[in-house]
């Protein structure tokens, strides 16, 4: 008799009827390349024209393979007849390509591209309008004018798409066949699309609920799945507490010793550090057991009272390890933005609350509850571990970090659903150099903005976004904007 399959809610083993046993890993995309040239021109310039155009298109293919080295680029060759277009479209459909890069090597009637695209209408299209160089050759001949006549084909095809209602979000990139900036733009778009697709395979766990009264964080699991992509899985608090009670003492002591050796700990007892280390073991095992990619936990008040600690050592260690993404207070939308930013940048973003402003610096103080990757500290040697300054009924001092974020270009974002649907906040700023830590027993950052600070805050408040924000190093504004478009949601950019 076969074993009885149970829900993850009650099963004692590791096989569940309602969770995938082997969740598909984030895989590379298949990029189909459609390159066209007009057969009529070959007889007009026999021996050279087709060879030169094919050489140009091979150059494009080679560059795409170089910049998209994490993906698979599929090129069925130069299309120059309707039969070739039909064959190429069927080939790319057979390969199940995820996205199309269309390139004209000469002017070419739109029926060829349409014939190929009929087979792969599911895939978004990047129209790469290109030519052999970035300069006009004032000594050129008519053969080379035809060789560089892709703009006619691009304009014609894009206009045809408009008339047909195809590809309303057509991505257009302009550059020569060796233009690194153009290939960079293509790579950004494909990277954003990949992250958008990966969200559909992302499992986010929720332990507890949204902090009472934080209506800005409230969410609808069905809306999230249908619009943003991730699966939201409610995990009973008892599952975490079971892991906490069953945590292996040897493993806890190993984490405790590592924590004591790494950080300057002020005002905490050995038991405070032990309990926080125990919480790390419990949280990591919960993530592993339920095949989660990310998790949000309401620590206040119940969990902290039952465990006698905060989740902040656990969250910090998990952020530094980089495999899972965690936050607190039931901020599911913030967790989704953290997931997106982590995939785009390869770095775990930080999690903060908007704070007070400085008119002279044109900046804001950002603060949150004691956890983030400690590599983001201005000076790693000054990172301090102290009590959690917010006490929510736990016995003991809790656990938190104090340091100030290092300087650098940053992107700030969050999501909210309002009466008109979802919208994404996208803001570029600069984390300023603060030479000494702000002595508030918390993680802080001072972020400067291009927009005058008081008008910025006026419009931000009026627009209506969450009181949390997610901060990532680097400029991710363009990719976030693209992902918002893929989701079909509004975006507010400052």
Image (tube, helix red, strand yellow):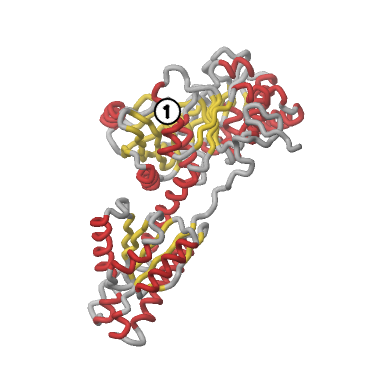
Relative to 337, residue 55 above or below: below
Q: Is residue 132 visible?
A: no
**Residue positioned 66% across, 28% down in the render:** 282
Relative to 146, residue 382 above or below: above
Q: Quadrant of residue 357?
A: top left
Indicate the quadrant containing the C terminus: top left, top right, bottom left or bottom right.
Answer: top left
Q: Quadrant of residue 87?
A: bottom left
Residue 366 is left or right of residue 301, and the answer is left
- In this view, the residue in front, 119 or 261, is 119
Q: Is residue 47 visible?
A: yes
Count of numbered tags? 1
Q: What is the secondary structure assignment of the residue under circle 1? A: strand
Q: Position of residue 239 (x, y in %)?
A: 64, 25
**Residue positioned 46% across, 60% down in the render:** 31
Farthest bottom residue? 47
**Residue positioned 57% across, 24% down in the render:** 400
Q: Quadrant of residue 151?
A: bottom left
Residue 30 is left or right of residue 477, and the answer is right
**Residue positioned 30% across, 67% down in the render:** 111
The residue labelled by disc 1 is: 468
- In this view, the residue in front, 244 or 37, is 37
Indicate the quadrant containing the N terminus: top left, top right, bottom left or bottom right.
Answer: top right
Relative to 30, residue 195 above or below: above
Q: Mark 1: give few (<14), some (14-19) or many (20+) Cα within 10 Å.
A: many
Q: Position of residue 294 (x, y in %)?
A: 54, 35
Relative to 316, residue 118 above or below: below
- In this view, the residue in front, 116 or 337, is 116
Q: Position of residue 271 (x, y in %)?
A: 69, 19
Residue 203 is left or right of residue 132, and the answer is right
Q: Position of residue 164 (x, y in %)?
A: 26, 56
């Amino acid at each position: 008799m076969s074993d009885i399959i149970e829900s993850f809610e009650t099963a004692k083993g590791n096989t569940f009827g309602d969770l995938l046993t082997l969740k598909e890993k984030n895989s590379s995309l298949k990029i189909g390349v459609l390159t066209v040239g007009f057969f009529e021109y070959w007889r007009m310039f026999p021996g050279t024209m087709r060879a030169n155009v094919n050489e140009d298109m091979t150059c494009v293919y080679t560059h795409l393979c170089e910049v998209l080295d994490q993906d698979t680029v599929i090129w069925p060759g130069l299309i120059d007849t309707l039969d070739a277009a039909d064959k190429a479209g069927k080939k790319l459909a057979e390969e199940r390509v995820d996205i199309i890069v269309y390139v004209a090597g000469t002017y070419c009637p739109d029926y060829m591209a349409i014939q190929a695209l009929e087979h792969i209408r599911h895939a978004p299209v990047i129209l790469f309008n290109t030519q052999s160089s970035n300069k006009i050759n004032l000594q050129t001949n008519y053969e080379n004018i035809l060789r560089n006549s892709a703009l006619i084909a691009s304009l014609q095809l894009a206009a045809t798409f408009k008339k047909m209602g195809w590809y309303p979000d057509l991505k257009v990139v302009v550059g020569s066949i060796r233009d690194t900036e153009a290939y960079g733009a293509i790579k950004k778009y494909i990277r954003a699309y990949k992250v958008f697709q990966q969200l559909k395979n992302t499992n986010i766990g929720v332990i507890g609920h949204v902090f009472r009264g934080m209506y800005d964080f409230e969410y609808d699991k069905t809306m999230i799945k249908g619009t943003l992509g991730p699966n939201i899985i409610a995990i009973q608090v008892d599952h975490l507490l079971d892991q906490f009670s069953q945590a292996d003492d040897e493993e806890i002591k190993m984490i405790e010793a590592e924590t004591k050796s790494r950080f300057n700990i002020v005002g905490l007892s050995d038991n405070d550090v032990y309990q926080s280390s125990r919480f790390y073991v419990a949280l990591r095992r919960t993530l592993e057991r339920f095949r989660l990619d990310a998790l949000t936990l309401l620590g206040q008040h119940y969990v902290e009272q039952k465990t006698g600690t905060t989740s902040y050592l656990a969250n910090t260690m998990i952020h530094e390890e980089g495999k899972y993404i965690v936050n607190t207070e039931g901020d599911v939308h913030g967790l989704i933005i953290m997931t997106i930013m982590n995939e785009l940048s390869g770095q775990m973003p930080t999690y903060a609350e908007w704070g007070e402003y400085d008119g002279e610096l044109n900046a804001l103080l950002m603060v949150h509850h004691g956890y983030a990757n400690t590599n983001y500290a201005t000076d790693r040697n000054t990172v301090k571990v102290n009590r959690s300054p917010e006490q929510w009924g736990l016995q003991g001092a809790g656990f938190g970090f104090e340091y100030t974020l290092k300087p650098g270009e940053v992107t700030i974002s969050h999501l909210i659903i309002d009466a008109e649907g979802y919208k994404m906040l996208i803001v570029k700023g600069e984390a300023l150099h603060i030479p000494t830590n702000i002595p508030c027993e918390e993680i802080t950052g001072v972020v400067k903005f291009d927009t005058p600070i008081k008008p910025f805050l006026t419009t931000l408040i009026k627009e209506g976004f969450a009181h949390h924000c997610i901060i990532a190093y680097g400029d991710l504004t363009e990719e976030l904007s693209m992902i918002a478009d893929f989701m079909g949601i509004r975006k507010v950019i400052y």
